[in-house]
Image: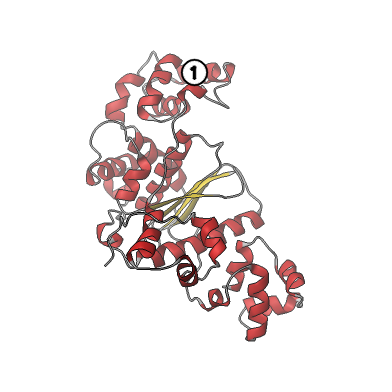
Amino acid sequence: MLTLARESRGWTQTELARKARVEQGTVSKVESDTLDPSDDLIGQFADQLGYPTTFFERTDEAYPFGASSFYHRKRSKLPNKVLRQIQARVNVTRMHVSQLAAVTDLDSRCLFRPLNPDECGGPEEVARLVRASWRIGEGPIGDLVKVVEQAGGVVVHFDFGTRLIDGLSEWIPPAPPLFCLNSNVGIPGDRQRLTLAHEVGHVFMHSLPQPDMEAQANRFASELLAPVGEIGPALRSPLRLRTLAGLKPMWKISMASMIEKAYTEELISKNERKSLWAQMARYGYQRREPPSLDVPREIPVLLNRLIESHLAGLGYSHETLAESLTILTPELHTLYGVQLGPQLVRVK
């Protein structure tokens, strides 16, 4: 827990030691479990890290990136220190979500089940099975966040502190599947939808890491958001940018994604794909598709409802809820924007 608290603040052992006025070796020994810290030492760490001392009494497991059912979608290599901070903060969030969900009926209505793409006929077939089991029906998915939350997943708009990571997922039963999407306002709604669909694919298909799992998750996301049997006829050659622009508001996926889908499904030739990308570059659409076609960002609500269930349904105050989650009250407000509201998740 000391390692988790320290990394969640983005500090090295040396930085914590300096702030707590102890030797770096003392921090190292406590974290490696070779030194049993005194209450006073725990208090020093707690004061500097901004956690109550009860945080260090937790027995939850922490999981690294690359562990079973912990996946992230990033655009480029991030410094290890940044990744470790994100990893720590997501672990803390998962601990909170698991604790909040434990007294609700959320687990009884979870519609996530492991599916092996090799046994099902490929990622696309898994996506079709998911659409069927979730009763999505034909046509575009109007609000993917809402659909995922209705299936028992918890979606969180998460401040990663960088635009270089789009989102991540983690599923450690009995906690519900957790999906963290980058809250940066500069990330368009269609990219957030693609990221969420990509992470849903990981949760369904990859209980263990696989060499080609990123490609599989991309194929799953493409078919989940826009089944080829439905959008395919509109993507056939000759394909024009104006056609893509007309389809984007309906299907809520990027023009770039549609070009790649058309090519992958062999609806257009390699030369036509090259021509379309050249046109996208000429108009500046590779960096920024037309603002008039922007897809609205979708808003998660389930985590807020879990918190409301404790405040309104179980009679917690903000202070007692923060104490239960082993964080300080100001951080409860900062992390989760606590607001009183109607009880929307039934308490057991």
23 w.r.t. 187: above or below: below
Q: Is residue 37 visible?
A: no
Write the residue at 36% across / 29% down. Answer: 251
The percent position of residue 267, horizontal first and vertical second, equals 36, 22
Colour pattern of the rendering:
secondary structure
Q: Is residue 281 left or right of residue 297?
A: right
The percent position of residue 146, horizontal first and vertical second, equals 34, 44
Image quarter (top left, top right, bottom left or bottom right) of the N terminus = bottom right
The percent position of residue 89, horizontal first and vertical second, equals 55, 60
Write the residue at 32% across / 44% down. Answer: 147
What amino acid is found at the position of numbered circle 1 in the picture? Leu
Q: Is residue 192 visible?
A: yes
Relative depth, front residue between 97 and 230: 97
Q: Quadrant of residue 10?
A: bottom right
Local crowd size for mark 1, using a 10 Å CA cut-off: few (<14), some (14–19), many (≥20): some
34 w.r.t. 334: above or below: below
Q: SS for tag 1?
A: helix
Write the residue at 73% across / 74% down. Answer: 20
What residue is pinned by disc 1?
A: 276
The percent position of residue 260, horizontal first and vertical second, equals 44, 28
Q: Is residue 106 left or right of residue 188?
A: left
